[in-house]
Amino acid sequence: MSLFSYRATTMEGEVIEGVIEATDEKVAIERIKNTGVIPLKIVAPEEGGLKARIGFRRSKGDLLTFTTELSVLLSAGLPLDRSLNILSELSESKAMKEIVDSVLKSIREGGSFSEALQKHPKTFPRLYVNMIRAGETGGVLDVVLDKLNEFLESTKELKDHVVSAMIYPAILFFVGGISIIILLIFVVPRFSVIFSEFGSALPVTTRVLLGVSNFMKIYWWAGLSVVIALWIIAQSYIRSTTGRLQWDTLKLKLVGDVVRKLETARFCRTLGTLLKSGVSFLQALNNAKDVISNQVIAVGLDGVAKGAKEGKGIAAPLSEANVFPPLALSMIKVGEETGQLDTMLLKVATAYEKSLREAVKRFVSFLEPIMILIMGLVIGFIIISILLSVFSIMDLPF
């Protein structure tokens, strides 16, 4: 038996917190429901401890948490306005509380839920609003919110996996860079004093090293300014249409496998979720195209919507675009032929999300030794340059 802390609400909207003992989370949820309240959040202390409680409080303003809790309240039979009122009271983020209050006010003034969300595009993206609108039109808002919750959870899980995989290379790069800077600014100058006292001719590599060291020590501000200026110029260029296209083309050449799998999973999950939620095919297709971040692939998909309007479906135009892997195209074609396109798209997304995790793992395993090798060569050059000078002063063969 385990202890689960929970937060729940009564049918009248009163928020309560407590602890319950159960064998697992499902049993805990059933026991909480049997007490006549609606569970909003279940946390197992042994799984997260203090971190879980802190994360629970910190995530109240998150879109995923908002969607999850609203879906639970609507599924329990509470009306939309009361559900939003409860979420407003639960929110510990001032910004999110103001947004929920604004949405609630718009609804009470006679506006629709989707129209109220549309007033806050930074919080609720167009994809989110379109799915909510489809749920309102079909009278299945609670079902659509559940689909949205699955979509946001999958997206967050994939993003977290990629970020966590890149943490170690980032730390390695940072620590290696700091080590090289310390050697050049603090260690090498000490040797330069010793070399100048002997007055003997130094090897070329040592003179180059001392030149770089002196420059960094005296003109570090100029070097830093140049780096910052180049970074700003590069970012400005990448934001332009031409620069973004060239940058995305370079990414496809360098890490094309990872990029294609990421965009395939993102496109298929978005389109499949929209179709499952009742959004019209052409609107869903345009929304799914908007989530593609690589402009080369996005440009390749321009003809897909046109082909769909002409009655060609989606499989044939996607094959002509030649931007997605062959396996994904084959699965989409099967889904279209069997009338289960939405289900097949979600299966493609799941398959490529799993494949993407493996691709990221392989990429990181390849990147780590490359970074270690580069750092080792730089540090090795510094050490060998110093040793060459020492041996030349002492007239020892190296």
Image (cartoon, rainbow, N blue to C red):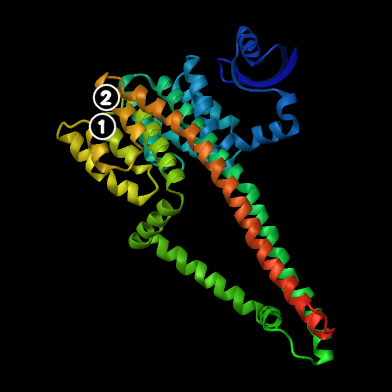
Residue 90 sits above or below residue 30 on the image:
below
Q: Residues within 10 Å of mark 2 (few under 14, many from 20)?
A: some
| Label 2 residue SS | helix
Q: Where does residue 325 sit, x and y in percent of width and height?
A: 36, 38
Quadrant where the image shows the C terminus: bottom right
From the viewer's perspective, is 48 left or right of 77? right
Can the viewer see residue 151? Answer: yes
Residue pictured at 40% horizontal, 47% vertical: 293
Residue 301: mark in rendering = none
Distance, label 1 to label 2, CA atoms, is 7 Å
Nearer-N-terminus badge (1/2): 1
Taking depth in this image into account, of 92 and 41 the one nearest to the observer is 41
Residue for badge 1: 315
Q: Do the numbered discs 1 and 2 sit on residues whose CB atoms are within 8 Å? A: yes
Residue 8 sits above or below residue 170 on the image:
above
Name the quadrant containing residue 332.
top left
Q: Where does residue 185 sit, x and y in percent of width and height?
A: 74, 75
Residue 336: mark in rendering = 2
Residue 138 sits above or below residue 350 on the image:
above
Can the viewer see residue 277? Answer: no
Residue pictured at 29% horizontal, 49% vertical: 299
Q: Where does residue 23 sit, x and y in percent of width and height?
A: 70, 11
Name the quadrant containing residue 186.
bottom right
Residue pictured at 57% horizontal, 20% vertical: 13
